[in-house]
Image (cartoon, rainbow, N blue to C red):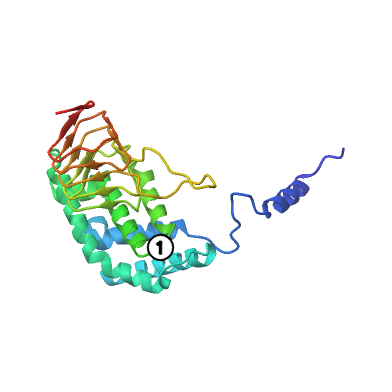
Amino acid sequence: MEKKDIFESIRDVKKSLQKADKYIPNVEERSIDRAEIKEAVKLFRHVVFGNFFGAVDLSTSLSRLYTILSHQIDYISRIFHESMPCCAEEISQKFIESIPELRRLLGTDVKAIFDGDPAAVSHEEVILCYPSLVAMYHYRMAHRLLELGVPILPRIITELAHSLTGIDIHPGARIGEYFSIDHGTGVVIGETAIIGNHVQLYQGVTLGAKSFKFDENGNPINVPRHPIIEDNVVIYSNTSVLGRVTIGHDTIIGGNVWLTQDLPPYSKFFQNREK
C-alpha cells in the first residue's frame, strides 16, 4: 500500500472534520469571542470600582461595554439560534442601566468580606486582593445577563472566575446582599441555589444537588435541586449541603459536614450532630 504524503492526509482529515459530529454542532460563522468577553468583564470591573484598576473614563468604558455586549449577544442569537426576549441592543442597554444597582450590591459584598476577615485591613485591600470579590463581580454581572434572557454568555463569564479563583458559582444561583466567601478555593454553588442576606461561606463548601430526575429519554430534568440558605447563616470549610433543603436563618454549620436535611432557624450543626 502506497504511503500517503502529509498533504493528502490533511485533505482527508479536513473532509472528515467538515462533517457534523453527533455531539459537536457545526458553527458556520464567527463564534463568541472570549477575548471580548474578558474585556467586557474588565470594563464592568472598571466602571464599578473606579480607578482601583487603572484610570477610567466612564463614558468611553460604558460605550465600549455596550458595544461588546451587543456584538456577543447578537452572535449567540444568530449562530446558536437561541431565542431571547428582545434584540441584543435593547438587552445591552438594560444591562448598562443595571450597573448602579450591581455596584450597590458589590459594595455590600465588599463590606461583608471586610467584616468577616480580621486579616483585612481596609475595603481597599478587599477590592484589590480578595479572590471572593473577583468571583462575585463575575457572578453579579453574569446573573444580571441571565435575568435579561441571555444564554451561554453568563456561563462563560462565571467560568472565567472559576478558572481565576477556584470558586464555581453558577450564574443561575440567587445570592442576596452582604455575601462573603473566606479564602474561597473549592466553593461550589449550584444553579438553583438560593442564598439570603449576610451569608458567609468558607473554602470547600458545596451547595449542590443530591440527585437528579430524568425524563423519558434519560435526560436530566432542570428542576430546583440545590439548597435554600436563609439570612445570617455561616457554613464552615469543606461542608456539603445537598438537595432542595432549607437551612434556617441564623444557623451555624461546622466544617466537614455532609448535610441532606432541613435545619430550623438558630441551629448549630457540627460533624453530623445537631446542637
Q: Is residue 73 placed above or below 254 in the rendered structure?
A: below
Along the line of sight, which residue is nearer the eye, 7 or 275?
275
Query: Which quadrant holds residue 259?
Result: top left
Which residue bears the numbered disc 1? 150
Relative to 89, residue 129 above or below: above
Picture coordinates of residue 187, whole percent (x, y): 31, 39
Q: What residue is at 21 percent from the left and 53 percent from the top?
A: 176
Callout 1: 10 Å neighbours few (<14), some, many (20+)?
A: many
- Quick one: 144 or 247, which is closer to the camera? 247
Q: Give the residue displayed 65% in from the left and 54% down from the top.
A: 20
Q: Is residue 18 left or right of residue 182?
A: right
In the displayed structure image, the side of residue 99 where residue 81 appears, left or right: right
Observer-nearest of 54 and 216: 216
Q: Quadrant of residue 3?
A: top right
Location of residue 168 with respect to 171 vertically, above or below: above
* Residue toward you, 111 or 77: 77
What secondary structure is found at the residue carrying circle 1?
Answer: loop
For the point 47% across and 46% down, which residue is it? 220
Residue 50 visible? The answer is no
Residue 4 shows up from this direction = yes
Q: Is residue 76 above or below residue 224?
A: below
The residue positioned 36% from the left and 40% from the top of the image is: 209
If the image is split into quadrants, where does the C terminus sit? top left
Q: Quadrant of the N terminus?
A: top right
Q: Residue furthest right?
A: 1
Under mark 1, the amino acid is: Val
Figure disc tally = 1
Give residue 182's position: percent from left, percent from top.
22, 39
Task: Give x and y (percent) for residue 21.
Answer: 64, 50
